[in-house]
Image: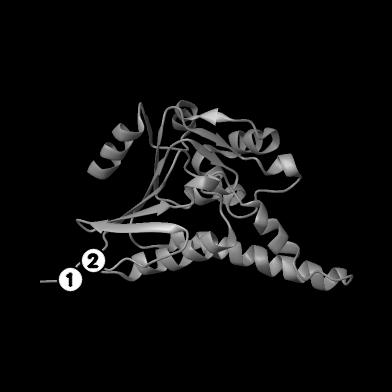
């Protein structure tokens, strides 16, 4: 008889396994699950674990608290420029390496050989869109709120959204959402094809995702 998998203990994620379903929950509810540097590292480690763990057959990714994820934590921006000097070339190369690492951290979700289902409630903003586009299937509540918010701070959504989202909803819709940064709800997300289905409540969504 095989032993029950031992989930990793991580600073920013809560991980449980039941009936070979690994539930990975973003666990910074007091910060609306904003993605600090530790969370980026934890996501990579956790999905590598799920990929290799024979006692895990499927992963459900969700968030604790009132929101799925409010995007990148402001502390990450300080990390991006930490150690910058007056050498523009070296600064650019350092920034490039950090961005590539962040991209790889989320690609660990996409590369996981087990199906990954996202269960989204509350806000899913900025980096959260990067994250969910890496998943195999996405489900949400009707009152969930989505937005590609990077344009509001003069950035490109360069950690996966602009690469993956057009495959899900098309180029034209992606461009409108990226250029305007507007909010859209779960019903529209389902109509666009960003999510597979929208549910009337969080409990209804969780029950349906678990059944799937």
Q: Is residue 150 left or right of residue 188?
A: right
Residue 5 lies, with reference to residue 187, above or below; the image says below
Q: Residues within 10 Å of mark 2 (few under 14, many from 20)?
A: some
Give percent across and percent down for residue 150: 68, 44
Which comes sooner in the sequence, label 1 or label 2? 1
Q: Tell me the quadrant of the picture where the C terminus can be found.
A: top left
Q: Is residue 205 left or right of residue 195?
A: left
Residue found at x 23% / y 66%: 55
Dots 1 and 2: beta carbons under 8 Å?
Answer: yes
Q: Nearer the viewer, residue 136 or 202?
A: 202
**Residue that lies at the very extreme toward the left in this rendered image:** 1
The image quarter in which residue 65 lies: top left
Q: Which mark is residue 98?
A: none
CA gap, disc 1 to disc 2? 8 Å
Q: Nearer the viewer, residue 186 or 34?
A: 34
**Residue that lies at the very extreme toward the right in this rendered image:** 86
Q: Nearer the viewer, residue 121 or 136?
A: 121
Residue 76 lies, with reference to residue 98, above or below; the image says above
Q: Is residue 6 visible?
A: yes
Q: Tell me the quadrant of the picture where the N terminus can be found.
A: bottom left
Residue 176 lies, with reference to residue 32, above or below; the image says above
The residue at which mark 2 appears reads as 55
The image quarter in which residue 141 lies: top left
The residue at which mark 1 appears reads as 3
Residue found at x 66% / y 66%: 98
**Residue that lies at the very extreme toward the front in this rendered image:** 30
Count of numbered badges drawn on the protein: 2
Label 1 residue SS:
loop
Residue found at x 58% / y 57%: 36
The image quarter in which residue 184 lies: top right
């Amino acid at each position: 008889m095989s032993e029950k998998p031992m989930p990793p203990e991580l600073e920013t994620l809560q991980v449980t396994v039941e009936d070979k379903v690994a539930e990975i929950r973003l666990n910074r509810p007091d910060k609306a699950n904003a993605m600090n540097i530790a969370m980026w590292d934890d996501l990579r480690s956790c999905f590598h674990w799920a990929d290799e763990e024979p006692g895990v057959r499927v992963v459900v990714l969700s968030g604790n608290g009132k929101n799925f994820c409010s995007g990148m934590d402001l502390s990450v921006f300080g990390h991006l420029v930490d150690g910058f000097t007056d050498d523009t070339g070296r600064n650019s190369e350092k920034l490039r390496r950090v961005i590539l690492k962040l991209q790889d951290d989320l690609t660990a979700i996409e590369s996981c050989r087990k199906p990954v289902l996202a269960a989204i409630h509350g806000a899913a903003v900025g980096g959260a869109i990067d994250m969910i586009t890496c998943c195999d299937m996405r489900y949400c509540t009707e009152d969930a709120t989505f937005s590609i918010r990077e344009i509001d701070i003069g950035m490109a959504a360069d950690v996966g959204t602009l690469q993956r989202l057009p495959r899900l909803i098309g180029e034209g819709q992606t461009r409108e959402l990226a250029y305007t940064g507007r909010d859209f709800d779960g019903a529209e997300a389902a109509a666009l094809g960003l999510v597979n289905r929208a549910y009337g409540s969080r409990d209804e969504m969780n029950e349906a995702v678990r059944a799937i």
